[in-house]
């Protein structure tokens, strides 16, 4: 991935706060939830819908074998990988560790395939119903990760590079810890907390001319007290400050509606949440 060489612009660092209108609250629902006993047990016993299977693919100069787990049936193109140990990778890493620090850093940056963590995410191109690969969405996301490279690991996942899997282009991404906003654990925040977490996430991307325009709960991960954005297939480029502010407010309002509906479902439909 070639660098976009975009630096934060002073004009995009405007402070703005979003206050949620009162009508977004459902008067029949509590403001704050926690996991119920059933929710705690469900989270502990959660298993993948499909058992892990062994896959192999080439990533740059390395041939990788890994056990893959599918996140869910709606996203078959995203796989959670447990990379199989490699003697070659261990030997190569041991040799590199003997070099001076500056040389180690250079080699790790130029050859990330040999220094991957044991768990990564493989995100392949989506397919149309016809089976044809969707090139446009993948190109957009690749460009977004490239431009937001300074934010990788803090606001968005790290992108280790591009590979090919089953004849499709794929990204090798950092596997984040924390919890998804779409999960029962992630559904225990108040709307004010959601707004306060989303604003710095958006502001950081706006500073590099990128607006995340797909406000689904599943596209945000709560990690160490901050939100990280996922799924950069739908973004807007180089918007003026006024539109960034307007669209960010719209994102927060839209996400709030979805979040309230999700809380209601987990509370009344599944019994996984209870009033705090």
Image (cartoon, grey):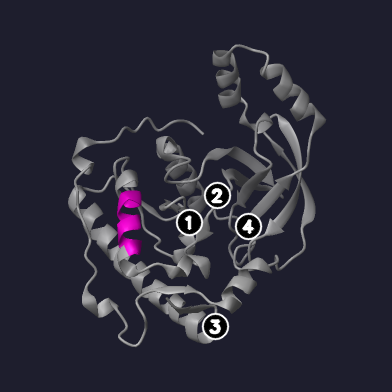
Q: Earlier in the sequence, mark 2 or mark 3?
A: 2
- Mark 4–mark 1 distance (CA, rounded to whole Å): 19 Å
- From the image, tell me which residue sits under label 2: 176
Is residue 136 positioned above or below 47 on the image? Answer: above
- Mark 3–mark 1 distance (CA, rounded to whole Å): 23 Å
- Mark 4–mark 3 distance (CA, rounded to whole Å): 30 Å
Residue 184 located within the stretch drawn in magenta = no
- Mark 1–mark 2 distance (CA, rounded to whole Å): 8 Å
- Mark 2–mark 4 distance (CA, rounded to whole Å): 17 Å
Mark 1 and mark 2 in contact? Answer it, CB < 8 Å. Answer: yes
Nearer to us of marks 2 and 3 is 3
Which residue appears farthest toward the top when viewing the image? 100
- From the image, tell me which residue sits under label 4: 77
Is residue 49 positioned above or below 134 on the image? Answer: below
Residue 188 lies in quadrant: bottom left
| Spot occupied by residue 48 in the image (x, y as percentages of width and height) | 70, 65
Q: Report helix, strand or loop for mark 4.
A: loop
Q: Earlier in the sequence, mark 3 or mark 1?
A: 1
Q: Report helix, strand or loop for mark 3.
A: loop
The residue closer to the viewer here, 74 or 46, is 46
Mark 4 and mark 3 in contact? Answer it, CB < 8 Å. Answer: no
Q: Earlier in the sequence, mark 2 or mark 4?
A: 4
Residue 200 located within the stretch drawn in magenta = yes
- From the image, tell me which residue sits under label 3: 271
Magenta: main secondary structure equals: helix
Q: Residues within 10 Å of mark 4 (few under 14, many from 20)?
A: some
| Spot occupied by residue 162 in the image (x, y as percentages of width and height) | 59, 39
- From the image, tell me which residue sits under label 1: 221
Read off the magenta span: 193-202
């Amino acid at each position: 991935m070639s660098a976009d060489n975009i630096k934060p612009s002073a004009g995009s660092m405007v402070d703005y706060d979003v206050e949620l209108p009162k009508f977004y609250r459902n008067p029949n629902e509590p403001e704050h939830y926690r996991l119920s006993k059933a929710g705690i047990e469900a989270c502990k016993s959660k298993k993948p819908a499909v058992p892990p299977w062994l896959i192999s693919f080439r990533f740059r100069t390395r041939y990788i074998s890994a056990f893959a787990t599918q996140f869910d049936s709606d996203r078959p193109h995203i796989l959670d990988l447990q990379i199989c140990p490699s003697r070659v990778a261990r030997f190569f890493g041991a040799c590199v560790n003997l070099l001076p620090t500056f040389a180690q850093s250079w080699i790790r940056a130029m050859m990330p395939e040999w220094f991957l963590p044991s768990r990564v995410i493989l995100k392949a191109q989506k397919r149309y119903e016809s089976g044809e690969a969707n090139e446009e969405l993948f190109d957009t996301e690749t460009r977004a990760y490239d431009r937001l490279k300074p934010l990788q690991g803090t606001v968005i996942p790290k992108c280790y590079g591009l590979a090919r899997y089953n004849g499709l282009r794929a990204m090798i991404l950092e596997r984040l810890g924390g919890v998804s906003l779409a999960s029962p654990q992630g559904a225990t925040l108040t709307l004010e907390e959601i707004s306060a977490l989303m604003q710095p996430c958006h502001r950081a991307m706006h500073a590099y001319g990128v607006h995340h325009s797909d406000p689904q709960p599943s596209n945000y991960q709560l990690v160490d007290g901050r939100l990280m954005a996922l799924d950069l297939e739908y973004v807007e480029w180089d918007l003026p400050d006024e539109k960034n502010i307007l669209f960010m407010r719209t994102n927060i309002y839209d996400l709030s509606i979805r979040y309230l509906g999700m809380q209601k479902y987990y509370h009344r439909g599944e019994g996984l949440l209870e009033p705090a």
